[in-house]
Image (cartoon, rainbow, N blue to C red):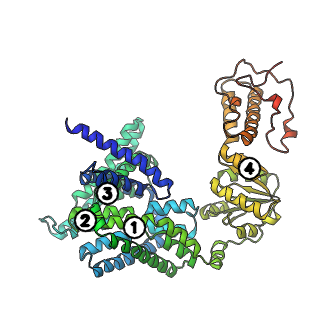
Amino acid sequence: METTPILYTQALMLLGGAVVAAPLFKRLGLGTILGYLAAGILIGPVAQRITEGEEILHVSELGVVFLLFIIGLELKPSRLWQMRRDIFGLGTAQVVFTGLVLSFLITFSGLLGGAGSIIAGFGLALSSTAFAMQILDESNDTNTRYGQRAFSILLLQDLAIVPLLALIPLMAAQAPEDTTTPLEDFAIAVAAVAALFAAGRYLLNPLFQVIARTGARDVMIAAALLVVMGAATMMQLAGLSMAMGAFLAGVLLAESSYRHELEADIEPFRGILQALFFMAVGLSLELGVVAENFLQIIIAVPVVMTVKSLVLYGLCRATGSHHNDALRIGLLLPQGGEFGFVLFTAAAAAGVFSQGTSSLLVAIVTLSMALTPVAAMLSKRLLHEQDEMAEELDEDFEGAGADVLMIGFSRFAQIAAQILLAGGREVTIIDHSAARVRQAATFGFRIYFGDGTRLDVLRAAGIERAKIVAVCTQKKEITDRIINLVKAEYPNARIFARSYDRLHTLELRALGVDYELRETFESGLLFGRRTLETLGVNGDEAIAIMDDIRRRDEARLVLQEAEGITAGRHMLHSRPVRPEPLVKPKRDVNHTAETEERILPILPSEDQPQGDETLAKAE
């Protein structure tokens, strides 16, 4: 009972640290992982509030196990086969070459020798999937050629952690005495993997089918945890790593119809345990060792990042990438990765090297992560403009140029394009997602690969001949950038834009677009109208109510443009309107005439409804 308050206090400190540090570091552009590390360092080595960092670390390593299970779930055999050359060719070469070079440098410098230098070198060869994918996503480059190659390298690095973790027991300084021969150990490992594959093929899917029929959500979650922990424990008993067992279980279930359900069930546990793991790494960091070796760390960080960048650049160029793509990849992946923390911590626990050395390596990885955004920005200054044109405009723009130039072809744009094409209008579509371009082209759309934020692409797509530029991109930042570019270069162009939300609508109006529409506004109106009709409201009455909501919304937007976002609150319905039934307004409104300028009319000031009055006030 005496330890219970201590456990509660420690749990509160860890949760509080995560809640404060992770959003703060993400806002600064440094990522949540560094936030968790910083919180752990502050709570543990600095404030000395928690001193049992290694004990917490053992529990939190389950977060890594769950992470590898989720990675396995994403690796469908068909996807692996499509990306096989970049994953198993370029990715393997990167890990092997970078690991060997860094291991040699570590041995040559005298920091470590033998097994320690190999684990340290290959651990530093891994990059941060979280950091790199965040940068690719923010710059909308995930589906570009260099983004796909970078993802392939990261994927192989994620896979490489499994054999690297399996190497640690073999390299341990004081390995436990083995009573079996190496051949027997190998046979046991093969038998365990075969048993796991058999269970995945013939047992797991029927098991989940039975549980799904019961409708018991909590039992499904328990079954998901049982599968992950059972597979991990089986591999551990066979002399392999728990991480390998979880990963194999994920791969076996990648084609299962229950894959998304399993991922959703495991994700909360994975997230909290992974956060706890990184905080535990910070708790166990020896600041004294870091302070004593500060000069070494300052020298090691740029050396590691430079070596990784040069190896990546050389391998990408050797395998067919242009200068710009190779440069982007080299400066996107020079940092150490979160799996380095896993590897170094496991190596220190097994006695491959000391806890002090582990702290030193963790500090190097942490600083390299913090410098990743700087390296990514540096790549933009080193690009060759000629290569950029050759790489990005390899799509044939012959025949481009139509009444409407549509930028972005996600769900919103696909529906809008159907209306235009049905009306007999030509539409030129450009999109920056290679996968979406390929998919849309199979349906016969006139679509081209290109980045709508670049002036040369817009010109090649025929913006000079377009009567309307329809900006239908998903991210508001990209939408704003395109609109600013078009306004600056083609001030007379008519711009129709998809807005993200109400605030974005007001921002677009301030930019001077000709027409904008919130991506969910009309669908929400129709959904509400259909719901009213199902509840028994007359069809004409439901349409009149929907039209009134349109007018109110437009009137609120006009007020908000002048007075701010809080204006027009009196026009919102916050409770059912009385009396009923709806009375037809005395003044008729000709919607068709008024929507030629804008789909929704602006309410005159004398007709603006006040408070909770009825939809149309009878006189």
Query: If you read the primary sequence from the N terminus, does the residue marked by circle 3 or circle 4 appear first?
Result: 3
Q: Amino acid at mark 4?
A: Ala
- Disc on res. 336: 1
Which x, y percent locates residue 447? 70, 63
Residue on which the image places disc 4 = 510
Measure how far apart labels 3 and 2 are at the Cα level: 12 Å
Which x, y percent locates residue 225? 34, 46
Query: If you read the primary sequence from the N terminus, does the residue marked by circle 1 or circle 2 appear first?
Result: 1
Q: Amino acid at mark 3?
A: Val
Q: Which mark is nearer the camera, 3 or 2? A: 2
Helix, strand or loop at mark 2: helix
Measure how far apart labels 1 and 2 are at the Cα level: 18 Å
Image height of 336 relative to 196, above or below: below
Residue on which the image places disc 3 = 281
Quarter holding the C terminus is top right
Residue on which the image places disc 2 = 356
Q: Is residue 454 left or right of residue 353?
A: right
